[in-house]
Image (cartoon, coloured by chain):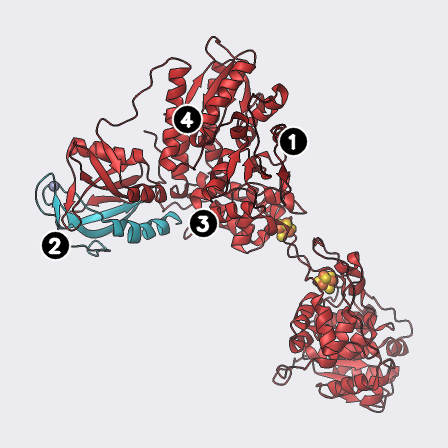
Chain colours: A red, B cyan
Amino acid sequence: MAQINERGSTHVYHVNRLSKDMMDEMISRCIYEQPAYCNAACPLKLDTKAMLKAVAEGDYKKALSLYEKASPFVHILSSGCDAPCEAKCKLCERGEGVAIKDIEKAVAQYGVRSKSGGVFRMKKKKTVALFGSGLFCLFLAGELERKAYPITVFCEEADLESFLAAETGFLSPEAFAAELSRLKGMDIQFSFGSKLDREFFLEKRPGFDVVCASKAAALRFFPEAVCDEALMVYPEEKLVMGLEGRVLDCAFAAKRAALSVDRLAQKLDPGNSRGEEGATETRLYTSLEEVQDSVRVPSGREGYTREQAVEEARRCIQCHCDECKKGCAYLEHYKKYPALLGREIFNNTQIIMGDHQLNKPMNSCSLCGQCKVTCPNGFDMAEVCHLARQNMVSTDKMPLAPHEFALLDMLFSNDEAFLCRPQPGFEQCRYVFFPGCQAAAIAPETVKAAYLDLCSRLDGGVALMLGCCGAICDWAGRVEMLDTVTEFIDRQLAALGNPIVIAGCPSCKKQLSAHEGLKIKGIWDVLCEIGLPEGAQGLDRPAALHDSCGARGDQETQKAIRRIAGLLGCRLVETPYSGDRSPCCGYGGLTAYANRELAKEMTEKCLDRSDAPYISYCMACRDRFAREGRESRHILELVYGTDAGAPPDISQKRYNRLTLKNDLLFNIWGEEASNMEPDYKLEFTGEALKIMDDRMILKSDVIGVMDELRQTGEAIFDAETGLLIARRRIGNVTFWVKYTETEDGGYLVHRAYSHRMNIVLRK
Amino acid sequence: MQDKNYYTIDPEGKLKCMKCGVALEKGKAKFMYLDNGFPVELPVCPQCGFVYVPEELALGKVLSVEKALEDK
Ligand code: SF4
Ligand code: SF4
Ligand SMILES: [Zn+2]
C-alpha cells in the first residue's frame, strides 16, 4: 500500500530564505495601495476620497477635520483653490467629474470644528519669527501653529483684520469673518506696525531659532536674495522665504516651507529627508464598467446646500482596484487585498519557530491563475502560494494532513489503478490516450467510449494510459514527488515508442506539456480533425460553457471546445468571466481538500454566472457542479452519448478507476483481472457511508481494519451501544470502525472515524 | 510533565476486550504526533494492552491538538 512520510518533527528550526527582491517585485504588481486620482493630484496631499466619503455619509464634522489637514484656512482654500483634483477625477472619463471644490466650500461652511487639540498641546522649544503678510505668510503661520512652534509675526499692518485682508480680497464677507475668528483662536504672537527693513530684521533675528519672511520682506532685507523654491529657503542666509502666487501655490509653498522650518530648527540641511511632496502620478486602476454618464448635481449661486453637497459627494465612486476580487472567491473570502495577503503568506514561510497562521490561506488558493488575467498589472496569487508551498515542503514545515488524501489518491491512480497498454495488434503506437485520473474516477463509461472511438478512427495505433499526470503533487508543492511522477510517465511513454499524447483533460495537457520533448494535443483537437462520432448530440436547452482553469491562456483549446459545442448543436448562453477569465470550480490547487467550505464558495461563484445547465471540459468541474445540484455535463459525455449520472463519493471514485481498469484489461486485452472484493461480506449502513464520505474515510480503509481484525481478533465491545469496535493504523492515520457481526460471518459497519496522532501504552 | 494527564476517561466496566474477555480499565497511555507526546488516561485492556480512543475524543480534543501542531 502506498505511503507518504509524515513530517518528522515540529521542532525544525530552519527556513529556506526567499529572495526579498523577488518577493517585492511580485507583490508590488498589486496597485491597490496607490492613491485615488483626485488624491494624487492634490499637492497638499488632501485625502479627497476620504473627505468625500465623509460628506456622502453626511458627516461634515469628520469631513472638516480631514479638509483642515490641507490648511486650517478652509474658506480661503476652498474659495481660491484651482482644484487640480477636479480635472483628474476618474469620472471625467464619463462626463463631468465630481464637483470637489464646491463640496469643499460646503465642508468649510457646514463643518463644525471639533474642540479637541491645540488647547493642551505642549509648545515646541524652538522659536520662529515670521516677517511680512499675505497668503504665503498666512498659510505658513497656520502650518507652524499646528506644529506647535511658538511664533511671532512681525507685520506692517496695524491689526489682525488688515493682516488677514492682505491678498484675500476674493473672500465673501461671511468667509472673511469666519477666517478672522479662526485666526483669533490661534496661538500666534503678533507685532503689528513693524517696520520691515534690514536693520529691524538684523536686530530681531538673534532672538529666534528660525526666521521666515514673505518674498517682499525678504527682498527688503536682502535685495540679492534668490529663493530655492523646492525648499522655500534663501540658502545663504538660512532664511525661509515666500513667494507670490495663487492660493494653491502659496498653500503648497507654505507646506514646503514648514518642512524646511522643521529641518532648520534641528540645525539640519533642509534639503534632506523630506519624503514625497506635492502631487504625484498614480498607478491605480479603477474600472468604470458600471458607471453611466456622469453629470454634476447643479448648484445655486450660493453654492451647494448641505443636502446638495451630500448628493454630489455620493456620486464619487471611491476609486479603488478590486478587479481580482470581483472574479475570485478566494480573494473575496480573505478580504485582504492581494499585496497584503501575498506578503503575509511569504512571511509565513520564513517563520523559524512558532505558529504558521497563514498555512490555511496559503493552501486554500486554487492556483488557477485567474487573477493574473483579471488584474490590470498581472498580479499572480497562484505564483505566490505555489512558491510558498514548495518552500514549506522543502524545509519539512508543510503539514501533510491537508493534502495527504489527495496525494494518496494520486499514488493509487499511478499504482493499483494504473494501466498502460498499446492497442492490441501494435507494439508501438502513434498515439496514447491519457484521459486523466478524474475522468476515470467520475465517468469511466465515457473514458471507455472515447478510447474505443479513437482506436477505431485513428491510424497507427492508440495506446491507453490510465493514471495521474502529477498535477496533484505539483499543487501540493511537492517537487520531488512530481519529479518521480514525471520520470514514471516518461518511462511508460518511451516503452510505447514516445507516441503523441491525446489528453482528455486540459489540466493534464498543461501539466504534461512541461515534459521535455513530449508531443501533446487534446482529444478536442482530434475530434475537430476527424469529426464527431455518430450519435453525438448536444443538450436541447441553452447551456452555459464553463472554461476550465487548466485551459487558461490556451486559446486553441477554448476554440476547439466551442467548435465541438457548435457541431453538437449546443446553444451556448453568454456568461461573464468566460475564456481566460474563468474562475476555478474549487478542485484546482487542492482547495477542496485544504479548505472545503471555501472550495464550495468557489463552485457557487462559478454557478452564479448562469441558471442554465453547465457544460464543461474538465471532469473535476463537471463533478463539482453536479455536487451542487446543477445539471452538469462533460462535453465528452455529449460526444459519446454517455451519462455519468450522480456524482460518486470518494470510495466510488476509487472503485470506478479499478473497475474501469479491470473491464478494459479483460475486454480489450483479454487479461484476467485481480479480485478486488474481500472474501467475507461487508455491508455499510447509509449513515456509515455518509459519515465516511464526510470524513474522507475510504471503504478500502475499512477493509484494512476488518482484515486486521480477522487476523488478530483484536476488538472491544461497548455494552452501552451494543457495537463492536476495531482499529488499525494505516500509514499516518489510525482508523476506527464500529460494527456488528452478521449471521453469514460478515460485518455491518455502523460508523467510522480516524485520527492522525498515534496512541501508545505508557509505563 | 510526566505526571500530568491531558485527558482522562474511566470505562466504568462498560467496555470489554473481545480477545481477552476482560473489562477495560483506566490505564496510562500517550498520544504521539510530530515528535510531541501527550500523556493521557484511557480505557486499556489489562491483558493485551488495547487502548481505546472514543469517537468524541478523536473528533474533538485530538483533532484540535493535531491541527495546532500541524501549523507549528
Ligand atoms: S486586481 Fe487585485 S491584485 Fe491586481 S492591482 Fe487590483 S487589487 Fe491588486
Ligand atoms: S471618483 Fe471620487 S475618488 Fe475617484 S477620482 Fe473622482 S473624486 Fe476621486
Ligand atoms: Zn485484551
Q: Secondary structure at mark 2?
A: loop
Q: Is residue A213 something one can see in this rendering? A: no
Label 2 close to label 3 by CB (< 8 Å): no
Label 4 close to label 3 by CB (< 8 Å): no
Q: Earlier in the sequence, mark 4 or mark 3?
A: 4
Asked whether mark 3 and ligand 1 are closer than 8 Å, the reply comes as no
The residue closer to the viewer here, A28 or A615, is A615
Residue A729 x %, y %: 26, 38
Residue A143 x %, y %: 73, 76
What's the distance in space between the residues labelled 4 and 3, CA to CA?
29 Å
The residue type indicated by label 4 comes to Asn
Horizontal placement of B57 versus A393: left or right? left
Residue A411 x %, y %: 39, 30
For mark 1, what is the residue? Answer: A559
Q: Secondary structure at mark 3?
A: helix
For mark 4, what is the residue? Answer: A414
Q: Secondary structure at mark 1?
A: helix
The residue type indicated by label 1 comes to Lys
Image quarter for ligand 3: top left
